[in-house]
Image (spheres, helix red, strand yellow):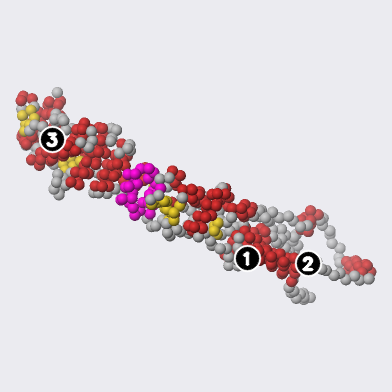
């Protein structure tokens, strides 16, 4: 067996300086695109190195031997002699196209993946892979170098390819705003097509890390350009990250704080006042600018739904403002609010409860369907009773225009024999309330009278219905007079 000699390794100086020059030029191009101050130095040094390497490599000496032709002829004869010593072997057909594919240089598309090629294998085959050019990794190379710390991109550079579609004025405004608001520089607009054409992957620029600690004043044009600049991002909505508000005649922007939400009230002054007065800690009212509305989630019915769900029914001022907000809404929205209230309590000596009743009646007076409004008031307006007792509702009240009712055969029944003293007293409190409301003259008189049935006496049928509800609600056992009254009413109604 013969031992294979191991050749000594030798550094290729020309190749080293050629590669270093290329790297310096590449960094110089990056510096040029990002407008680093050292861009000219890198470009000058890199190009100088390349020029020196090319110049040196072009100098090559060839030794001319006088007996060169005789030497070549001798080498050929020696090769033929050595070949005669080899045993004959079968010659296989050679594929010229395959050979050319290995020998001839290839044009490689950097946008397509390169398939690994290898030489035909023998019994002891060795694969020789064709190396992929460095251009194949160009989009990720800069990213990898930045991650490894070999080169470092400044973190104050903001790059968004879609901003190339902005007008020159808009891009200029965005550039000024990003520097003023966030301390970030923006890649010049003229360089964006170049970055996109080379598919260079720069560190990603997102809005998640942008913060505005102190409020900054903005013009309407600046606000339009800023919202337009953030449109391509899918991280969050613009108003999930920043909030706008108006102070005097100026508009301000800042980062959102914990639990804050941007709302849009439009030109509704009652809605704006309500949010600022009762939800100032979590709801920030934006300027009443139409182009803002599409980007704000809490507005219109969604905002109103939020306010109704978080309404404090004990707050008299909040109820008064909410009625102003709902006054022009549809009946369904008003019913949704009233259902959330459940009941409205009235206490004769409590001025706040009277104001609440007045506000609710004002809202009911705005209903398109007056019958629905009347039914709702009869159900929700109550006089609270002692602990453990059931509240007295408006729909239970007796008209009490007279103290008795006459049935057939001149049979007269006194109300005091049919209902207990507490029931009659609560009915009198309701009558006093409706009289007090009529004296205020704050809504149309006919509407108020219709809501309370103030001008009607209880018919036999109505009184009989109230009597049955009274007996069932308080789980009473009727006496002889009540039984007689019930039987007579039933006979008269069934005729």
Q: Quadrant of residue 467?
A: top left
Which stretch appears magenta?
260-287
Per the model, the C-alpha gap separating discs 3 and 1 is 94 Å
Disc 3 and disc 2 in contact, CB within 8 angstroms: no
Q: Is residue 442 left or right of residue 195?
A: left
Q: Is residue 462 left or right of residue 190?
A: left
| Residue at 21% from the left image edge and 42% from the top image edge | 357
Residue lying furthest front in this view?
Answer: 249
| Residue at 33% from the left image edge and 50% from the top image edge | 276
Mark 2: give few (<14), some (14-19) or many (20+) Cα within 10 Å: few
Q: Which residue is mark 2?
A: 55
Q: Quadrant of residue 466?
A: top left
Per the model, the C-alpha gap separating discs 3 and 2 is 116 Å
Mark 3: give few (<14), some (14-19) or many (20+) Cα within 10 Å: many
The one of 204 and 463 positioned closer to us in this rendering: 204
The one of 151 and 287 positioned closer to us in this rendering: 287
How far from the left and from the top, in percent, is residue 444? 23, 33
Mark 1: give few (<14), some (14-19) or many (20+) Cα within 10 Å: few
How far from the left and from the top, in percent, is residue 174? 52, 53
> Does the magenta run of residues contain 261?
yes
Q: Check disc 1 and report its element: helix, strand or loop.
A: loop
How far from the left and from the top, in percent, is residue 233? 51, 52
Q: Which residue is mark 1?
A: 38
Which of the marked residues, 3 or 1, is nearer the chain's N terminus? 1
| Residue at 78% from the left image edge and 69% from the top image edge | 56
Q: Which residue is mark 3?
A: 398
């Amino acid at each position: 067996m013969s031992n294979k000699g191991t050749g000594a390794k030798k550094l290729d100086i020309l190749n080293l300086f050629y590669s270093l020059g290329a790297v310096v030029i590449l960094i110089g191009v990056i510096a040029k695109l990002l407008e680093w101050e050292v861009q000219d130095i890198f470009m000058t040094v890199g190009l100088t190195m390349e020029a020196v390497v090319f110049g040196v490599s072009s100098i090559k000496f060839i030794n001319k031997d006088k007996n060169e032709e005789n030497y070549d002829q001798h080498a050929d004869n020696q090769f033929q002699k050595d070949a005669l010593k080899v045993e004959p072997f079968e010659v296989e057909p050679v594929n010229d196209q395959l050979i050319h594919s290995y020998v001839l240089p290839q044009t490689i598309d950097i946008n397509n993946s390169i398939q690994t090629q290898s030489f035909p294998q023998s019994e002891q085959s060795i694969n020789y892979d064709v190396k992929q050019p460095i251009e194949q990794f160009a989009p990720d190379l800069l990213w990898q170098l930045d991650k490894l710390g070999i080169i470092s991109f400044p973190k104050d550079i903001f790059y968004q390819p879609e901003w190339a579609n902005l007008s020159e004025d808009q891009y200029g405004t965005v550039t000024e705003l990003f520097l003023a608001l966030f301390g970030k520089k923006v890649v010049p607009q003229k360089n964006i097509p170049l970055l996109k054409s080379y598919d260079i992957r720069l560190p990603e620029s997102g809005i998640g890390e942008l913060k505005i600690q102190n409020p900054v004043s903005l013009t309407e044009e600046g606000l339009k350009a800023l919202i337009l600049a953030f449109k391509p991002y899918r991280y969050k909505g613009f108003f999930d990250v920043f909030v706008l508000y108006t102070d005097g005649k100026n508009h301000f922007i800042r980062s959102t704080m914990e639990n804050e939400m941007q709302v849009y009230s439009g030109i509704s002054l009652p809605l704006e006042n309500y949010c600022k007065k009762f939800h100032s800690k979590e709801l920030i009212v934006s300027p009443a600018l139409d182009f803002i509305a599409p980007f704000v989630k809490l507005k219109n019915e969604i905002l109103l739904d939020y306010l109704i769900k978080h309404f404090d029914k004990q707050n008299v001022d909040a109820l008064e403002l909410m009625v102003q907000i709902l006054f022009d809404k549809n009946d369904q929205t008003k019913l949704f609010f009233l259902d959330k209230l459940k009941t409205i309590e009235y206490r004769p000596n409590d001025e706040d409860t009277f104001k609440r009743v007045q506000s609710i009646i004002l809202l009911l007076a705005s209903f398109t369907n007056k019958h629905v409004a009347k039914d709702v008031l009869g159900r929700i307006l109550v006089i609270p009773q002692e602990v453990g007792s059931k509240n007295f509702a408006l729909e239970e009240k007796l008209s009490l225009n007279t103290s008795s009712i006459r049935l057939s055969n001149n049979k007269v029944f006194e109300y005091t024999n049919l209902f207990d003293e507490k029931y009659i007293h609560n009915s009198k409190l309701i009558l006093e309330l409706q009289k007090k409301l009529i004296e205020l003259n704050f809504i149309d008189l006919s509407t108020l009278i219709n809501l309370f049935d103030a001008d009607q006496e209880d018919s036999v049928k109505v009184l009989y219905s109230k009597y049955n509800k009274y007996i069932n609600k308080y789980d009473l056992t009727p006496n002889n007079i009540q039984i007689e009254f019930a039987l007579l009413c039933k006979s008269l109604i069934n005729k």
